[in-house]
Amino acid sequence: MSPDSATSGVENLASCHDCGFVVALAGEAHHAETRCPRCRAAVHRRKPDSLNRTWALVVTAAMLYIPANIFPVMRVISLGQAQEDTIFSGAVYLLVHGMWPLALVVFFASVVVPLLKLLALSFLLISVQKGWSWRPVERTKLYHVVEAVGRWSMTDIYVVTILVALVSLGNLATIEAGMGAVYFAGVVVVTMLAAESFDPRLIWDRARETNG
């Protein structure tokens, strides 16, 4: 078998996005019709409209990130006195009261990580659109890191949810979730969807086109 025929055969294969089964594609107009024989999901050579959908989700997450850090995520009512905390003020409160390890976890997981994810996804999108061939291996690893750490940004929401469920003592003490928690959950979910919609194979497509 010649190298050209071997390469052509590989290019006619695609992995199912749902179950990972490798499917042989046939013809140029096969993209919408090809189905995985294992799970019957639609199979595409590349994720359709990956860049446009990812950009839309990144912009949406960036818009949600602002109110998520402005509005309070938690409202504590104790003996008739109410106190509201944003993500940042909650981290400061923990730091002032000597709980600096927990303060660092909240700050990095809820403030720094979502922002870095947005910046990383924006960088990957721009690099693909500009056709950069620069360090495709490192950019692919960056994508996998962004995809892996997405769920850990929900740490703050988990804490608020547990406190709301456990602390409900009427007039004595009550904890309620604030609007900031809703916006922040939206940021985390939308950034996870953005990472899922981005097709890292586009990084290698652009690198191959540049290198001829």
Image (spheres, rainbow, N blue to C red):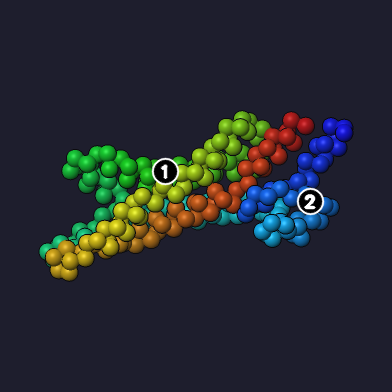
Q: Residue furthest left?
A: 79
Residue 184: image location, x then y, percent? 39, 55
Q: Is residue 192 placed above or below 126 in the rendered structure?
A: below
Q: Is residue 124 above or below residue 43?
A: above
**At 34% across and 62% down in the image, what residue appears?**
179
Q: Mark 1 or 2 closer to N-term?
A: 2
Residue 198 visible to the viewer: yes
In the rendered image of this protein, does residue 133 appear above or below residue 188?
above
**Which quadrant: the N terminus?**
top right
Q: Label 2, on which residue? A: 25
Disc ID at residue 113: 1
At a point 27% along the width and 46% down the height, the residue shown is: 91
Are there few (<14), some (14-19), or many (20+) residues within 10 Å of tag 1? some
**Among the 4 quarters of the image, the one containing residue 9:** top right
Q: Evaluate if marks 1 and 2 touch, with contact meaning CB atoms under 8 Å apart.
A: no
Describe the element under mark 2 as helix, strand or loop: loop
